[in-house]
Amino acid sequence: MYKRQKPLHKGLGLIRRDKNAFGAAFFPLEGEFPVHMPPFKRGKGPFLYDYDENRYVDFELSRGSLIFGHAPPWICSMMKSWISKGYSGGFSVGVQHMLEKRISDLTGCAVSGRWLFFPSEFEAAAALYYIMGRYFDKERGTVIGHTGTAGSGFSPFAGLLLGARCPDAADADLDFVVLSEARETERDMAAKTVYRVKEGGGIFVSDETDLARYARMRAGASVYKEADIRLFGSYLSSGIPFGCIYVSESAVSRMRGIACYDAFTDIASFSFSLPLHTGKSTLRSLELLREKGGMEGFFSKQEKYFRLLDGRFFEQEEGLVYLKKGQPEIRYPLLHLELLRKGVYFPLSEDQPLTVSFAHTDEILKKCAKIVSSTMQEHVSGTNEGQR
């Protein structure tokens, strides 16, 4: 960003040697530059570094999960300290009780509900998939707001359902519904389906496994207040692989066979896999987030960045910054490549939000906003010139 990018000799060498590997498909070349991203070697604070030590300011941040940036010192020291006390879970009951209280405060969940914690949102999604069939006897579910296309984003739970048991929401007799809302989803349609399923005794799951889905819950749509189960992801832990399930007390009362000890250990064995160092690091993340004003403080940071950007090209939706839709002159893959060459890393899809972390200083944001605005103006002018 601040100096001329070095040629990608080492990075290109890695790509060319990796032709037979699955990962090579993600690094096609445009001339002498990877189309999507250079192969990154490390991250620190708001920056990513490739194998040739070029530096990029990261506005993707692992789909917004890295609330404090890459490798914050306090996470590194916390992980180093607690990992020596054990990799395994099963003895961190005290940590789980503290997590319940902190996440309840942050997300507005009632403390009387039940929680399960996991080493990733993928394991949480797999556990919830099992729980729906084993303890709720719910087999037929659908996903609202996930079209299965790359632009709609990926959700672990939605992915499981789309591949297994996802009938059409409009005409199916559903046992449960998962709201994994994409930007284009009409809320009225979502609300009607949710209420229809609940009236029939079904379960409503709110999929909040990434920041954009959580932001839509935060926006206050009334339908979210009806959630029986909420599924959370790694943004609660500042990017450390983490996932958790919240089940409301009313939903717990409808679970089958949960009273006996064997059934409890069957379901809780998923949760006991949370390593102690992950639980302690997540607690520290939540404490620091509270000191920064909680998620409201984080969304205020997004607002600050939005005000620096050119309003012709960007919009703010439910607290996050997006590229404005309906701009045919913006060819996003080319724009993404142009910004990479100038040291700015945007999300791979124009449907994903641009996020900033607490590690992005005001100086970095101001400099990047100028680079982004000028690049977009050049890009639009070049596109229009080419069309003429």
Image: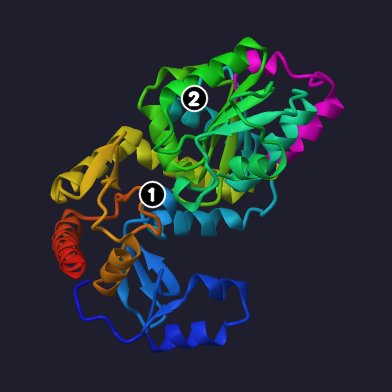
Give the residues drawn in magenta, as a range.
Answer: 247-271
Q: Is residue 11 above or below residue 326?
A: below
Q: Measure how far apart labels 2 and 1 are at the Cα level.
A: 21 Å
Q: Is residue 258 above or below residue 308?
A: above
Please name the colour scheme applied to the rendered image.
rainbow
Residue at 42% x, 25% y is 187
Q: Is residue 37 above or below residue 284?
A: below
Instruction: Point out residue 297 in the picture as x, y percentages from the top left corner.
Output: 28, 37
Mark 1 neighbour density, 10 Å: few (under 14) some (14–19) many (20 or more): many
Residue 337 in which image quadrant: bottom left
The residue where tag 2 is placed is 190
Q: Is residue 364 above or below residue 219?
A: below
Question: What secondary structure is found at the residue carrying circle 2?
Answer: helix
Which amino acid, by three-letter code, is at mark 2?
Answer: Ala
Instruction: Point out residue 372 in the picture as x, y percentages from the top left corner.
Output: 19, 61
Does residue 270 show up magenta in the picture?
yes
Instruction: Point out residue 211 in the picture as x, y percentages from the top left corner.
Output: 42, 42
In this orientation, does residue 111 appear? no
Does residue 349 show up magenta in the picture?
no
CB under 8 Å between callouts 2 and 1? no
The residue where tag 1 is placed is 352
